[in-house]
Image (cartoon, rainbow, N blue to C red):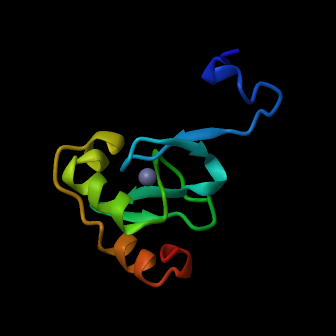
Amino acid sequence: MRRHGNLEYGCHAAPQRTCVGCRVRTDKSELLRLVLVEDQVVPDLRGRLPGRGASLHPSMSCLELAERRRAFSRAFRVPGPLDVSRVRAHLEGEPRNVM
Ligand SMILES: [Zn+2]
């Protein structure tokens, strides 16, 4: 018996987001919400910053993938290269980063 992917968790309505790095859909709670403040991508740790957000796994490899794909400028709909140093600093100091 095969199950259709989108019905698998039909009774759980956990919100899902796609990671802008690896493009995997995951529970929103597993992902780090990022917002754009001027030209800087910053982690929205309390989920309170306004504006368009992007979701990323809290991992360096996903950050690098996202950078390589220019996923941030696509997610935030801005042309330029964006500064992700605050996200990187956050991930470097994040114990969950090393699994
Ligand atoms: Zn990811």
Q: Residue furthest left?
A: 80
| Rendering coords of residue 31 (x, y %) | 55, 55
Q: Is residue 97 above or below residue 83?
A: below
Which residue sits at x=53%, y=73%? 99
Query: In the rendered image, which quarter is residue 40 located in?
Result: bottom left
Which residue sits at x=44%, y=77%? 90
| Rendering coords of residue 62 (x, y %) | 37, 58
| Rendering coords of residue 73 (x, y %) | 26, 46
Front-lying residue, 97 or 41? 97
Which residue sits at x=24%, y=56%? 67
**Would residue 90 appear left or right of 41 to someone viewing this image?**
right
Which residue sits at x=62%, y=48%? 28
**Would residue 15 appear left or right of 54 to someone viewing this image?**
right
Quadrant position of the N terminus in the picture:
top right
Q: Is residue 51 above or below residue 8?
A: below
Q: Total of numbered circles in the picture?
A: 0
